[in-house]
Amino acid sequence: NMTEPCTFVIFGATGDLARGKLLPALYHLDAAGRLHPGTRILTTGRRHPDRDAWLSETRADLSGTVRGGLQQEVFTRFADRVDYMQGDLRQADFYKQLQARLADRQGFPADTAFYMALGASDYAGVIENLDRVALLEEQLGWRRVVIEKPFGNDLQSAAILQQKLSNHLREEQIYRIDHYLGKETVRNILVFRFGNVLMEPLWNRDTIDHIQIIHAEPQGIGKRGATYDASGALRDMIQSHLLQLLTFVAMESPVSMAAEALHAEKLKVLKSIRPIPADRIGDYAVRGQYDAGKVGPDDVIAYRDEGRVAADSHTETFAALKLHIDNWRWAGVPFLLRTGKRMTAKQAMVAICFKQPPQQFFRSSHIRCDASNWLLIGIQPNECLRLEMTVKAPGEALATRQTALDAAFRKADETVNDAYEELLLDIVRGDRSLFLSYEEVTQAWQIIDPVLKAWSKPGEDLHLYPAGSWGPRAADRLFDSACQSWRHTL
Ligand code: BG6
């Protein structure tokens, strides 16, 4: 289970991603004995003058983030692998120092993953500079570069970024990460679909009415005002995570689980998505922005009052999209994607609504008119599979009610690994199957591009919704029938 020794270089060591996700994931891997004793981590940042200062803040961070609380013994081992280098990555000198530090044989293995935990506008410059000091050359060991989303800002800028990267890197060296694919519950979609015979015969237009792919979170945008205001929910969640989830739900069985095979099937799904007509965006997409409201017991401010957000911002914090996949399996089955910040509760799930039986014999005592059968795949925080069925209610003759077959994803004594843990090890193993190909990324931009263009302007179609709600009612109009409605929680 342990991988070969390697070096992780993390650019942006004091940013939210490194502090909140990457370092906790590396710590957890170390705690579980999954990091080779020879693996080393070099972090770089501007703020801390030296390793001690950085490490003491990191220790405090980890105490708050790691599962089961910080264990001193693990932290000591972890700290021994870590080094820190202060510097400004916009200066050419920085790379000479970095090169010297890594070559200094201070025990840094030659196999190296460079992790861009940076603002997207820095990726190309850093990679060019790494190449300039020969840090991307692979004579002594592999050199891989990990790139977070967003990969570009739209179709055109993604192509420009790709062009710049390919001047310095072979495609096999580029790891475009989408942390949703590291979630065990997301990978379970593939196992559930292709590890059983029960579901696959039902997984098509004959039995499925429509599919919802949902992500809601009670958090606002926190300190990300400046970047979020230039991005919005469509770019932040739908272009990446939700479209990726859609590919897992909709793709055909790949010939194997190898990267090329998976990428090919996912790409076929994305290419089969019917383009959204530019003159009918409102029939397919709904945007919203949170107003002031109450999340749980807390009063929270409107999006436009958040720090570093324009007072007249028309950036969407809620987006819902209806897509059609034009292929034999899915013709006529709408896929509804919805995401929002400052919603009532955290809930990420895939909700599959099956068709009604062709005849209604029974007197139903349940309220939903849309369906008798739903399959809910809970991604977080409820990690489960739930199949809702109609059964007879005891007592009255042939009255019915809904019941659910529930399967928790994990047993009480099991933990679910964080998304980044498995993905970090995949990088070391050279397994790109859960990373995105450039074709997938660009196809995903292609799908949302007409909506991005329409939403780049302010308009009355931006619906304000109170913080702490399930988003604007306007999103209901994406359904084809009055009997269909959004599923909110499991
Ligand atoms: C990130 C987005 O990629 O995913 C955030 O930039 C969002 O805005 C987050 O909050 C959601 O991830 P998760 O794993 O918490 O559902």
Image (cartoon, rainbow, N blue to C red):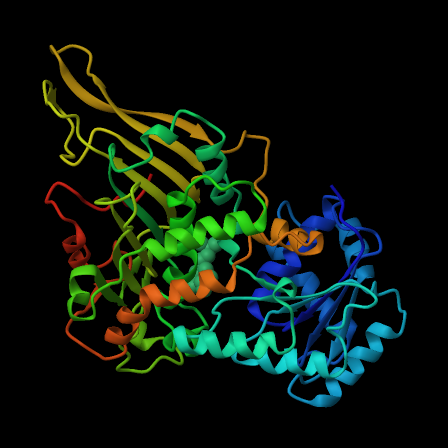
Q: Residue at x 63, y 72 (%)?
A: 14
Q: Quadrant of the N terminus?
A: top right
158 versus 18 height, above or below: below
Residue 277 in percent (x, y) is at 20, 66
Q: Is residue 39 left or right of residue 348?
A: right
Q: Is residue 120 visible?
A: no
Q: Residue at x 44, y 78 (%)?
A: 157
Q: Quadrant of the C terminus?
A: top left
413 versus 183 height, above or below: above
Q: Quadrant of residue 54?
A: bottom right
135 versus 296 height, above or below: below
- Depth check: give the residue in front, 28 or 443: 443
Give the image quadrant in which the ligand numbered 1 is located. Answer: bottom left
Q: Quadrant of residue 282?
A: bottom left
Residue 6 in percent (x, y) is at 78, 59
Q: Is residue 486 left or right of residue 86?
A: left
Residue 236 in percent (x, y) is at 40, 66
Q: Residue at x 43, y 44 (%)?
A: 379
Circle count: 0
164 versus 238 height, above or below: below
- Depth check: give the residue in front, 204 or 176: 204
Q: Is residue 6 left or right of residue 154?
A: right
Q: Is residue 409 visible?
A: yes
Q: Residue at x 71, y 79 (%)?
A: 131
